[in-house]
Image (cartoon, rainbow, N blue to C red):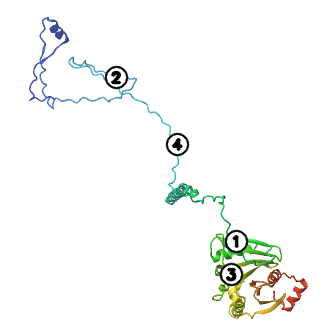
Amino acid sequence: MVDPTQKPEEDIIIRTMKGDLNRLTGTIPEKPSIVKPVPPILPISKETEYKAPQAPITPLTPSSPPFLPSEPAPASRPPILVVPPKIIPSKEIPEMPVKPLYKATPVWIKLGIIGLAVILMALSGLYGYWKIFIQSKLPATVNPPISTTTVPTLPTASTATTTAPIKFFNKLPNKSVTIDLPSKTPLALIQALKSEAKIEETRASVKQIKITHQGKPLTADEFFNLMSIFAPKNFLSNYEDEFAFAYFSQKEGARPILILKIKDKNLAQNQMADWEKMTLTSDIFPLFLSDSQLPRTSPPFKSYLFIGQPVRYLNINMPFASLNYAIYNNFLIFTTSSAGMFVILQDLTGQSVSQNYLENLKASINEFVK
């Protein structure tokens, strides 16, 4: 509704294309037609208002023609094109198959994988460091080859730099084995000797065991310490550093043998007589390489003669085993069976005995081998 207080608009001048062309060509222009404004429409009182019933509005379909106004639009307004809305039918989209949801990996598995990856990276780094920085430098530490050419010199008297090895046997041993210890410890020595004792050899044969560490032979003092053999004070000072250790093979197993080289024979005899009265049996017992134990009280040592040589012996709580020791020339001999002592003395003296002699000897000493 138009506001009745509104002022009438000014005269509207309408220009046409024809008038503009005439003005450009120089013809007489026509006066523009003045269109008078339409007087405002007064408001209609509410009493005269009439509400016509409204017909239901039907939706337009693509087949029905668009609604056109019954009266033409005024000339001053452009025609309004009414485009009916285009209805696009809905397209059915096939449903995609839904994959099952995977369960989350536990945290401890993730941590384990990360830890394993870190360990592998560390190991690979260490290997690379060793390969590049250590292994590549190893050839440089190798000693250069010693020249085999000799320069002629004047003949001089040769000096011995090393002493000759001690000859502990004549025709023995039947076999010799060298054990190089990985470490100079009692456990390493005991395990090596027990492993070698389990190897079966020819009956009544002697197998010498040479014990070394990094290629260097053990001394008698080192052997006693590693074997836990407790000798009297200053006992080993009367013996050479070199010693002989061997196994005597018999039906019941290997029986150890220990031979020491004496410096002073008279002193050695006195030392053994004193040691025998004290703790010789318990001190020397580790030589048997046995897990059994000695009785609390042991009988005194006894003696017998074999090929004119005195032997001191003592039975222990082991089948076909006994502690025997003898001094022959400059050798102190320990054996863990009487049969082993028989074999060693026959080899050192160069004398042999018959089986009948051995049987009579066993009977005379009351079967001390058992």
Q: Specify few, some or many for label 4: CA neighbours under 10 Å numbering under 14, 14-19, or 20 or more.
A: few
Q: Name the residue under label 4.
A: 97
Q: Which mark is nearer the camera, 1 or 3?
A: 3
Q: Is mark 2 on a helix, strand or loop?
A: loop
Q: Is residue 99 above or below residue 72?
A: below
Observer able to see residue 7: yes
Q: Mark 2 points at which residue?
A: 66
- Residue appearing at x 12%, y 26% in the figure: 42
Q: In this view, does 43 lie above or below 125?
A: above
Q: Which mark is residue 240?
A: 3
CA separation in Å, label 2 and label 1? 116 Å
CA separation in Å, label 1 and label 4? 74 Å
Q: Which mark is nearer the camera, 2 or 1?
A: 1
Q: Is residue 42 above or below residue 75?
A: below
CA separation in Å, label 2 and label 3? 134 Å
Q: Amino acid type of disc 4?
A: Pro
